[in-house]
Image (cartoon, rainbow, N blue to C red):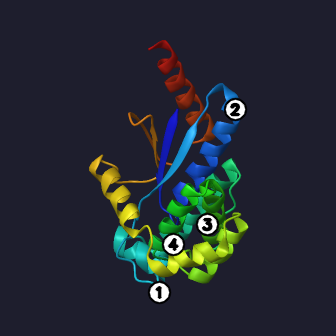
Amino acid sequence: MRIDFVSDVTCPWCAIGFTALEKALERLGSEVPVELHLQPFQLNPGMPPEGTDVVSYMARKYGRTPEQVAERQAFIRDRGAEVGFAFGPRTRTWNTFDAHRLLHWAGIEGRQVELKRALLAAYHTRGENPGDHHVLLRLAGEAGLDVERARAVLESGEFEAEVREQERRFRALGIDSVPSVIVDGRHLIQGGQPVEVLENALREIAAGRADS
């Protein structure tokens, strides 16, 4: 079973969805062999390198007041706790394109999941900038990647075309919100679903494949 997990690094529901997906896959174990691919999606491709204040950003994009932003973040913290993901203070949102380039390379190196976990914890738990090259290099090391090769990727603009092409491809398929879980290129599960929902959906899809 091939699973494409389409997400952005600064998307809180993506952190919830990815954590839930990993737990669902743990429950399935060897019963359903899975090939997991993490795909790029930028919620804010025009975000400047210096980022922007979260409250101001949410006010502009969704018309939310500071009180509504605080309520929403509290709700997200609770949902994260349900799947075992810890949200900390997130006061700014950032451009994530370089993080996606590094994730693309990490996929080639077989360390994509490890880097994804590190990126989600860095931003959502510790409030770090996932566009900062110093942060990205540290996380690459934590994920077991070659730091000097990671530096070369970041400084050269390598994999820029590949990431943009993947983003275009999934938007062309109708993906306009994340997280989106695409199974075998045919089945779509959207949103930060609970572990049980993902587990049951994957079991049903696997059963359907076996019967076909």
Badge 1 amino acid: Glu
Q: Which of marks 1 and 4 is in front?
A: 1
Q: In the rendering, at what x and y percent does residue 177 appear?
A: 38, 54
Name, please, the residue furthest toward the bottom: 50
Report the front residue among 62 and 183: 183
Q: Which of marks 2 and 4 is nearer the N terminus?
A: 2
How many residues crowd mark 3 within 10 Å: few (<14), some (14–19), many (20+)?
A: many
Residue on which disc 1 sits: 50
Query: Above or below — where is 143 with respect to 184?
Result: below
The quarter holding residue 149 reads bottom right
Residue on which disc 4 sits: 67
Query: Above or below — where is 161 with respect to 169?
Result: below
Image point (39%, 61%), residue name:
162
**Helix, strand or loop at mark 4:** helix
How many residues crowd mark 2 within 10 Å: few (<14), some (14–19), many (20+)?
A: few
Badge 2 amino acid: Gly
Say whether marks 2 and 1 touch (CB < 8 Å). Answer: no
Q: In the rendering, at what x and y percent does residue 187 appear?
A: 41, 34
Say whether marks 1 and 4 touch (CB < 8 Å). Answer: no
**Helix, strand or loop at mark 1:** loop
**Helix, strand or loop at mark 3:** helix
How far apart in space, not on screen, are marks 1 and 3 (Cα)?
18 Å
Count the labels in the image.
4
Q: Earlier in the sequence, mark 3 or mark 4?
A: 4
Badge 4 amino acid: Glu
How far apart in space, not on screen, are marks 3 and 2 (Cα)?
25 Å
Q: Which of marks 3 and 4 is in front?
A: 3
Q: Can residue 132 be seen in this view?
A: yes
Instruction: Tell whether 91 sits left or right of 191.
Output: right
Q: Which of marks 1 and 4 is nearer the N terminus?
A: 1
How far apart in space, not on screen, are marks 1 and 4 (Cα)?
24 Å
How far apart in space, not on screen, are marks 2 and 4 (Cα)?
42 Å
